[in-house]
Amino acid sequence: MKKTLTFLGALVVPNIAFAIPRPTGNLTSFVVYIGQIINVLVPLVSTLAVVYFFYGLAKYILNSGDEDKRKEGKDIMIWGILAMFVIVTIWGIIGFIQATVGNTTGPTGTLDITIPGVNPGQVN
């Protein structure tokens, strides 16, 4: 199992790293950059939670004769459901906060922050 996850990670991580442009130096681009990273990671983590749940379900069904293995499969399913619940809850809270501060595009939109600047010629 560890070898499979390591192999899949080696395939996915370079794609994530090269798919996201680097920030140019201001706060707006940094926030957009972090948002892009989150937008890539959320579906990946959600998929892993669903796969973990189905792994527990398969373990529960295939080991129906052994009570200890059934309990282990049941525990895996519970953790998978809990992970999915946490992911959806956090995603909903982020969407609520974005809607509250005025970003109406939802959790997948980019946040546009305008930073006030000071022109050195205007300082007395």
Image: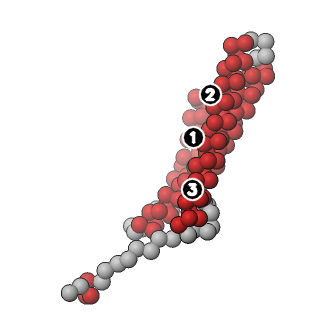
- Residue 8 location (% of width, % of height): 61, 39
Q: Quarter of the image holding residue 81? A: top right
Amino acid type at image mark 3: Ile
In front: mark 1 or mark 3? Answer: 3
Q: Quarter of the image holding residue 27? A: bottom left
Which residue in the protein does label 1 denote? 9
In front: mark 2 or mark 3? Answer: 3
Position of the C terminus by quadrant: bottom left
Residues under numbered marks 2 and 1 in contact, where contact means CB atoms less than 8 Å apart: no
| Residue nearer the viewer, 124 or 54 | 124
Q: Is residue 90 above or below residue 78?
A: below
Q: Say whether disc 1 or disc 3 marks the residue closer to the N-terminus.
A: 1
Amino acid type at image mark 2: Met
- Residue 29 location (% of width, % of height): 46, 67
* 90 left or right of 57 in image: left
Label 2 and label 3: CA atoms lie apart by 33 Å
Which residue in the protein does label 3 denote? 94
> What residue is shown at x 27% (from left), y 88% (from top)?
122
